[in-house]
Amino acid sequence: MKLKNLFVVALAAAVPTLAMAKKPTKVAAEAPVVAPEPDAEPVITEECVMNVSLFHESVKNKMFADAYEPWFDVYTNCPNANKSIYTDGTKIVEALYQATSDAAEKERLAKLAIEMQDKRIKYFGNDPKYPTAYILGEKGLAYIDFYGDTKLAEARECLRSSVEGMGSSSKIMVLVKLVDASYAVYKQNGNAEQFIADYELASNALAEQAGNANNKNAEIAAKQKDYVDNIFAISGAADCSKLDEIYAAVVKDNISDLDMLTKIAKLYRRVRCTESDVYFAACEAAHKLQPTQESAAGCASMAAKKGDYEQAIAYYDQAIKLAMVEDEMEDVADYQYNAAFYCYNNLKKYADARKYALASIATLNGLGMNKGQGRCYIIIGMCYASTQLYPQDAKGRILNKTVYWAAVDKFVKAKQVDPSVEAQANEFISSYSKYYPTKEERFDLPNEFSGNTYFVGGWIGESTSIR
């Protein structure tokens, strides 16, 4: 009879009686089970089939102690019988581990939990849905669950191998624990390069999961990405000088590898090391190979550092267009703000600064984001406050003060839409409101200051209230 038919017959015969059984069927003492040869495929007996059914039902009912004996019999004698040996086995061993206070028993169960994953790889490592790479992730998690901080290096090695194999299909917990374990190992051995590489691998996978509209766990992935980003930020490995020590040679050796250069540039921007010469070198090389928003933004920062702000704006224009193509609209808003800042602060091109700032506000509005708009309104207000619209004669000196009304309007708007800038906005409101036209000055120009509103002309071209 073929093995498949044997399964069916055995299960049909076993299930009605197993429901009544209280103890697992034991192998007769006079007929001991003979261990198979090391390279031989274990034989799946009727006894195995019956015990699979028995332990599986016990696990379903959370009767883990009852499940152990039939499970261990199958695990020992026919480990290739069914994948549930390992999925249910993990639950059984974990439950028994938590239930006992005996140190020797805990150690035995911990070793069994790790051995179980190795055996699963041996017999089911070719499973298309849960291949060896996936199982290595389970092994890494088992190291952490059963050994805590005592086998972090082993855990990290398994988790790293798992993520390398599974990529963005990795379990979220595997990705998070890879960063946790790698960070702990980094604190022990100071190997920043290893920790940074692990962080990048996990962070990129989480970002891909978070950005997948069809992923039901996208929101969880996004939150966990924030978590690993925070771990990396506080780790000390993100120190710009340390990054330079690691990546200066990598950039030089991969000057024609667009993928590597882009990854390095993204890492530097993520940890705000965008003043680094290594970052600039990576961006410049990548931009020559194939312009991207990342490379364009890096080149913009490089140009600004050299004092070439016109060139910086030109690069930001490229970055804006490329980021729009990639639908990275938060980046678009950042680039628009940066362009606005350089136009205001360095080039004194106030009308252009307002154009970029308003564009950034519109982009953030489209994303439903208020944070970030405040800094744009403050830039516009500063541009207004820095403007002289009229000649410096007696009348002009009074009319030039009207720009402060318009400027304060923007500072008020800034804190209304974005509470994060409230303190800065209040400081500017207090400073510039001192320079409003006085009552006496408005009395001297009755034609200009009739009514309750005033139109501020020139490039500003806005109506404001007289106060």
Image (cartoon, rainbow, N blue to C red):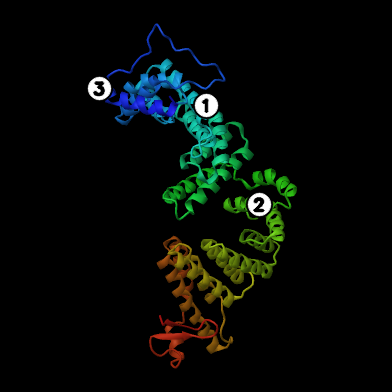
Secondary structure at badge 2 equals: helix
Secondary structure at badge 1 equals: helix
Residue at 48% of width from left, 82% of height from top? 402
Measuring from the top left, give residue 160's x and y in whole percent.
Answer: 56, 37
Mark 2 nearby-residue class (10 Å; few <14, some 14–19, many ≥20): few
- As measured in the structure, the alpha-carbon distance from the residue carrying label 2 to the one carrying label 1 is 34 Å
Residue tagged by mark 1?
Answer: 118
Residue at 49% of width from left, 50% of height from top? 209
Measuring from the top left, give residue 323's x and y in whole percent.
Answer: 57, 63
Residue tagged by mark 3?
Answer: 20
Indicate the amino acid at tag 3. Met
Q: Earlier in the sequence, mark 3 or mark 2?
A: 3
The answer to whether 276 appears left or right of 467 in the picture is right
Residue in front for this viewpoint, 76 or 11: 11
Q: Quarter of the image for the C terminus: give it.
A: bottom left
Q: Earlier in the sequence, mark 3 or mark 1?
A: 3
Residue 259: mark:
2
- As measured in the structure, the alpha-carbon distance from the residue carrying label 3 to the one carrying label 2 is 62 Å
Residue at 41% of width from left, 81% of height from top? 465
Residue in front for this viewpoint, 147 or 305: 147
Indicate the amino acid at tag 1. Asp
Q: Is residue 238 visible?
A: yes
